[in-house]
Image (cartoon, rainbow, N blue to C red):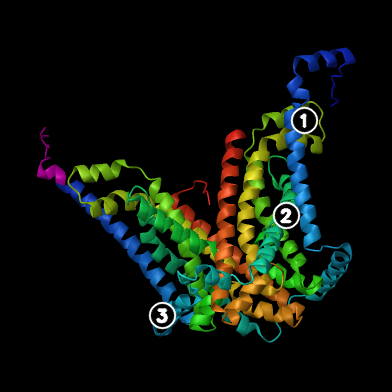
Amino acid sequence: MAHAVTRLPDAQLAPMLAAYEAAVRERRRHSFIAAAVVTVCIALAAWMGEVKPGVLFANAGRLTTYFASIVPTLRWDSLGADLAEWYWNLDHWLKLLLDTILIAYLGTLIGGIGAFFLCFLACANLVRSRIIRLAARRYLEFCRTVPELVFALLFVVAFGLGPMPGVLALAIHTMGALGKLFAEVVENIDMNPVEGAIAAGASWPKMVRFAVVPQVTSNFASYGLLRFEINVREASIMGFVGAGGIGQDLVEAIRKFYYSDVSAILLLIIAAVMIIDLVTEQVRHRLLGVGGGR
Amino acid sequence: MSRARITLDAEARARLAAAYPEALAPSPAQRLRMIAIVAALAGMAMFGFWRLDFNLDRIGSGLVQLGHFLTLMIPPDPGTQLPLYIHALGETLAIAFLGTLLGALVAFPFGFLAAKNVIPNIFAHFAVRRLLDTVRGVDRLIWALIFVTVVGLGPFAGILAIATASFAELGKLFSEAVEALDRKPVEGIVSTGGSEVEAVRFGMLPQVLPVLASQLLYYFESNARQSTIVGIVGAGGLGLHLAEQIRVLEWQKVSFLILMMLVMVAVIDFISSRLRFSIIGKTRLEP
């Protein structure tokens, strides 16, 4: 099947072509300016960040040898013994891994409960008073902007070494992060039940309980699970500053060049994170499916 | 304005309850499930508190300590170290910027490799996805520690750590963006005789570039937060000074450093949200 392409006369075509050229030139100019700005930024940042590609190339060999040396020696004929040697401290590490997951769980739970009570105060559709709303928002913002590890450092000094400061640090950061997400969910609810509850004479807490909470629980639970996943990863590094979990052993292994221990612990963490990812993903799909989603 | 209240007598209540049983009381099975879930959550929390030995004495004395520190933090004061801190701030920005950019550059081809509609081979797709998952399972602070042992102390290790972590996360996001795109422009190009590479260049790139750019900016924001902490393991930036000042209990400097961090993050958020809006228009972004 052949199509006949109609060609406009040149006189009509010329202004269109000129307009097209001009548009392309304009876009090229914009891209050029953007590229120049980015290049200048890169140069500045490279100077500030003491980037020495030479060092990287000189040490690139070290990077590969590092990864080569953390790979354990496993021989086929003595596989069992080699594996046992690689994971010589498995009991201890599994206990620490359990601690890590518990730190993440408690941090998520406490932070989630805090976020639950605060998020309703930060919503424009439920709270009239600007002052309360702004105060709640700023507080949540502060909680999520300061990194967990900074809170952990502070709490380790105040509460002493151990998993407790880790849990509290995760809880505060989680409260900030979840509070924002929760507030967004609440701002998108259907307002009819709220009006109904108020019209029937419900007080503010009763209105929230009976008109808002039933609409948002499944989304809240889904976000909570997502945060739990992230927190497991975060909890694995809390030990870097003495706040409990498997990080303590990992940092020791890396600093003291116990090569096979590094890979053993890293693999344990990766496996735990992957399993938790898979499980929470299943649960989240079911939650959003059953709860009707948004 | 007085409100009229409708009060139901006992008979009307009973009639309504009989007519709409599910509205007044959830079914026993549902209620049982609810109780079981709450009990399981609470039980696990109790086990956690017991295992991680929480006790009220420690919490109480810790809170008193914390309150004391807070009073010592006011007013924030850098002392004589302001130039040093400004330099560290520059390092932090450099780590976030170069780390994000480098990570994105490496993630870009991987985004296409890990997308089902570009590479139909299931094994290649699976291998790339698992590689990204493995790198993502390791926190950026662990990468920082590893890179410190490889390239030495300093911000360069931080850049590499942020780049590695961003690479895995952005690679996954990019591949999802590529998988979600519209097939029609690609088919159009193939049907007019374009090659595979041309199909990617003219059919896919124009669709995914704005999405990628906005994700990139989003990651820059989040990396600006993260790059403040890689210093804790010696990879440059504000974190190094922060950890040091907390260790020597110089609370005024600590609060000044935290303030610097907050201001930096607020400024970056502002700039990048403006840029994002100008790239993708005023629509709501799903992070």
Q: In this view, does B74 lie to the left or right of A42?
A: right
Number of other residues with Cα within 10 Å of mark 2, as a class: few under 14, some 14 to 19, many 20 or more: many
**x 73%, y 56%: residue:** A106
Residue B53 against residue B88 in the figure, above or below: above
Residue A46 x %, y %: 45, 78
Residue named by callout 3: A60
Q: Is residue A102 above or below residue B264?
A: above
When the figure is inspected, residue B124 is found, relative to residue A186, above or below; the finding is below
- Is A257 or B221 nearer to us in this picture? A257
> Magenta-highlighted stretch: main secondary structure?
loop
Q: Which of marks 2 and 3 is nearer the N terminus?
A: 3
Amino acid found under the numbered disc labelled 2: Gly
Q: Is mark 2 on a helix, strand or loop?
A: helix
Query: Residue A111, labelled with which disc?
Result: 2
Query: Quadrant location of residue B27?
Result: top right
Kind of residue at disc 1: Ile
Q: Distance between the residues labelled 3 and 1?
A: 66 Å
Label 2, label 3: how far apart the Cα atoms are: 42 Å
Marks 2 and 1 sit apart, C-alpha to C-alpha, by 29 Å
Crowd rating for badge 1 (residues with CA inside 10 Å; few <14, some 14–19, many 20+): some
Relative image position of residue A88 (x, y in whole percent)? 61, 72
User: In the rendering, which numbered label is found on residue B161?
Assistant: none
Pointer 3 indicates a residue of which chain?
A
What kind of residue is marked 3?
Ala
Q: Is mark 1 on a helix, strand or loop?
A: helix
Residue A198, numbered label: 1
Residue located at (63% from left, 53% from top): A227
Residues at discs 2 and 3 both on one chain: yes
Work out whether residue B216 can be spotted: no
Q: Are marks 3 and 1 in contact (CB under 8 Å)?
A: no
Query: Which image quarter is the N terminus of chain B in?
Result: top right
